[in-house]
Amino acid sequence: MSLKARLLSRRNFLMSGTAAIGAGAFFLYPDATLGSTGVAHNPLNIPALDTGSLQNGTRSFDLSVQTGQTEFFPGLKTPTLGINGSYLGPTLRMRSGENVRFNVANDLNEQTTLHWHGFELPATADGGPHQVIDPGTTWRPEFPIKQKASMFWYHSHLMGRTADQVWAGLAGMIIVDDESDELGLPDTYGVDDIPVVLQDRIFYRDGTMPYRLSMQGRMMGMIGNIALVNGTVAPYFEASTQLVRLRLLNGANASIYNLAFDDGRAFDLIGTDGGLLGAPVRTNSVRLAPGERVQIIVDMSKGGPAVLRNIPGGTGPSFNFLELRPAQNPASSQALPTKLADLPEISAASAVRTRNFLFEMAGMMGGFRINRKEMDINFINERVNVGETEIWKITNATMMMHPFHVHNTQFRILSRNGVPVRAGENGLKDTVLVSPRETVEILVRFDEYTDPDSPYMYHCHILEHEDDGMMGQFVVV
Ligand code: C2O
Ligand code: CU
Ligand code: CU
């Protein structure tokens, strides 16, 4: 790469979003704070791994939701929120079939909640808008892990306040293991199995990243001009092995990322939201909406460094996220298996009914709603019978893409505009992106946990849309 090309690609870590967002004078310019050190100059932060403590078959985790200060830029302290730390939280690791308990202490001076995104669990343990944790109190949900090996996450879900609390830092990863660890996939945390929380933020000259919604932010959601990976600005990761497994989470408020490497190299998609795919899918890019996760395997044994970028095709600014640097003498990795998980066939035959969900806007300037209704915490929108398979037909009548997320289930995508989905989209999902004028059909079932009084949520995972009303409630009976 020529020096100029190199500088340009370095600048990309920070710069390209600024013009699109405008009002540049208020933003913290990278030139001013980073000097001539260039970008991709920070080692990627790997969130602490927390395996809790196992007692009488229950694994418990102590979590404190707290305020803090985070040094994203040298010498500048940014006020943030975090879990057991100043920004984001530890990666919680547990095993399928175990019982878990979380002791969530709210050490903020405002209310919060913590939601376990992607898990099947009793509604009262879900951590949604109904499980408010008052300041100074501790919430202790407990449930068995029904999910297969994958990556999940936890985040604030406070009614009307999810967007600003997540923006400030209230989110973290969860890794679930199961017998698939015999497949020989890279699985050494922080070495060849890397958590990658993708976000973008807007920083001001004084280092603050306040949550301030403009008109455009109200419509599109808060989209930043600076990329963060696990809270690291302009990160690199030094790979020591041939194969590297990246567990990618779109933890942004609103940006839809279309991810690819700068050299166009192919990689293997091995898992989606709730588990491994049937077989690896070779691809050059993957689109990830807020809330969605994928696991990919990148071959670092040839081709030099590779920069993971957001390319056109989503909505976020086109910046670089993470530079992977290969080792001189990489440790060899086991070959990728050709078969991963056993997934039941996707078949509409078992569905007993179809339920319709229409995304629309009440007017030109917002009013996001589903089926003509804005979220009302005192209203149950849907009652679903336990154990019955249903088709949920989601139609997007707006001009924007919306990621539809359903609590308490891992579903399958049946079709997009009537066409069965391609490999790579046919795995376990809890969030699905719906494009303008698109109808997506998903196959949904809730296997247990009936409770006529405590609802679960379904909603758009663009957090500004969720907070603005694009959410509904269902009970399982
Ligand atoms: Cu990731 Cu209802 O949330
Ligand atoms: Cu969720
Ligand atoms: Cu939306």
Image (cartoon, rainbow, N blue to C red):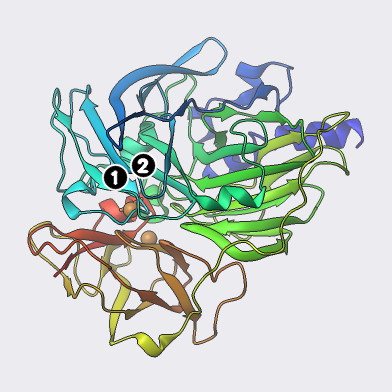
Provide the residue designation for mark 1. 115
Disc 2 residue type (three-letter): Tyr
Image point (33%, 66%), residue name: 364
In this picture, is 243 found above or below 383? above
Mark 1 residue's CB less than 8 Å from ligand 1: yes
**Ligand 3 is found in which quarter of the picture?**
bottom left
* Quadrant in the rendering for residue 466: bottom left
On the image, the x and y values in percent for residue 176 come to 45, 45
Image point (24%, 75%), residue name: 371
In this picture, is 321 found above or below 429? above
Whether residue 399 is visible here, answered yes or no, is yes
User: Can you say which quadrant of the picture contains the N terminus?
Assistant: top right
Residue extending farthest to the bottom is 349
Say left or right for 412 vs 134: right
Nearer to us in this view, 81 or 450: 450
Numbered tag placed on residue 154 in the rendering: 2
Dot 1 lies on which element?
Answer: strand
On the image, the x and y values in percent for residue 458 come to 28, 62
